[in-house]
Image: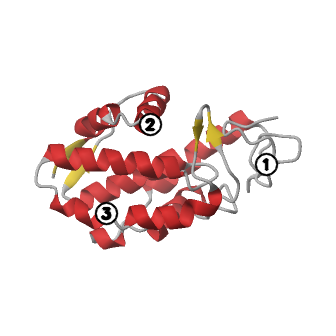
């Protein structure tokens, strides 16, 4: 049995199941998805940000946000995965390369301050989002934590983020296009999402 990430079986799932082992001991994937949505929405709502500079947006901070969102659900919340995963034809970063590749990407974030117009910023942010999504550092919850991370990052740069109402499939299609070196769809999403504070 394969889960949505193409893993036949790994230590993250219950035996003979594609359901992730969770702190609530839910064995049904639909019920787990509902619980994830409710718990992460509440954790998101009650998050208390602290003053950050661009240099604070590190892999450690992404792990902190993932732990915050998923702490009620998974023992491994905030910890990088140690299994290889893929979705459709997209193979995500080999797990042994997550940490070094993440550190390279996060070192580029302070340069976002050098973007002097919206178009330049949108181009850089779309590219960074695509690369971090390809990293897919966690066993579950990558999309949610990335959007959370970028909201905080863009706020630090002086922008408000209101994600456009698009389907999950549109998000997936935009990210697949990015993997295939076409950032136009992600750029459209970010252009619609951000506005100056």
Confirm whether residue 41 shows in the render. no
Mark 1 is surrounded, within 10 Å at the Cα level, by few (under 14), some (14 to 19) or many (20 or more) other residues, namely some
Residue 192 vs residue 83: left or right? left
Q: Residue at x 31, y 59 (%)?
A: 153
Task: Check if mark 3's residue and mark 2's residue have beta carbons within 8 Å.
Answer: no
Mark 3 or 1, closer to the camera: 3
Where does residue 191 sit, x and y in percent of width and height?
23, 38
What residue is disc 1 on? 13
Residue 105 location, quadrant: bottom left
Position above or below: 150 against 169: below
Image quarter where the N terminus lies is: top right
What residue is disc 3 on? 109
- Mark sitting earlier along the chain (1/2): 1
- Helix, strand or loop at label 2? It is helix
- Mark sitting earlier along the chain (3/2): 3
Where does residue 37 sit, x and y in percent of width and height?
56, 42
Mark 1 or 2, closer to the camera: 2
What residue is disc 2 on? 175
* Closer to us: 111 or 16: 111
């Amino acid at each position: 049995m394969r889960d949505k990430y193409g893993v036949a079986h790994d230590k993250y799932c219950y035996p003979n199941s594609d359901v992730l082992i969770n702190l609530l001991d839910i064995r049904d994937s639909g019920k787990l998805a509902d619980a994830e949505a409710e718990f992460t929405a509440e954790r998101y709502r009650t998050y208390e940000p602290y003053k950050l500079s661009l240099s604070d947006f590190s892999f450690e901070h992404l792990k902190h946000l993932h732990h915050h969102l998923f702490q009620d659900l998974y023992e491994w919340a905030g910890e990088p995965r140690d299994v290889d995963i893929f979705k459709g034809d997209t193979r995500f970063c080999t797990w042994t390369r997550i940490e070094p590749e993440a550190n390279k990407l996060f070192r580029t974030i302070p340069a976002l301050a050098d973007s002097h117009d919206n178009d330049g910023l949108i181009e850089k942010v779309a590219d960074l989002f695509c690369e971090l999504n390809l990293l897919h550092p966690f066993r579950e919850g990558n999309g949610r934590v990335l959007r959370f991370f970028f909201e905080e990052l863009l706020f630090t740069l002086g922008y408000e983020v209101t994600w456009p109402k698009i389907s999950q499939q549109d998000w997936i299609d935009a990210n697949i296009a990015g993997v295939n070196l076409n950032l136009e769809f992600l750029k459209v999403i970010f252009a619609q999402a951000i506005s100056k504070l």
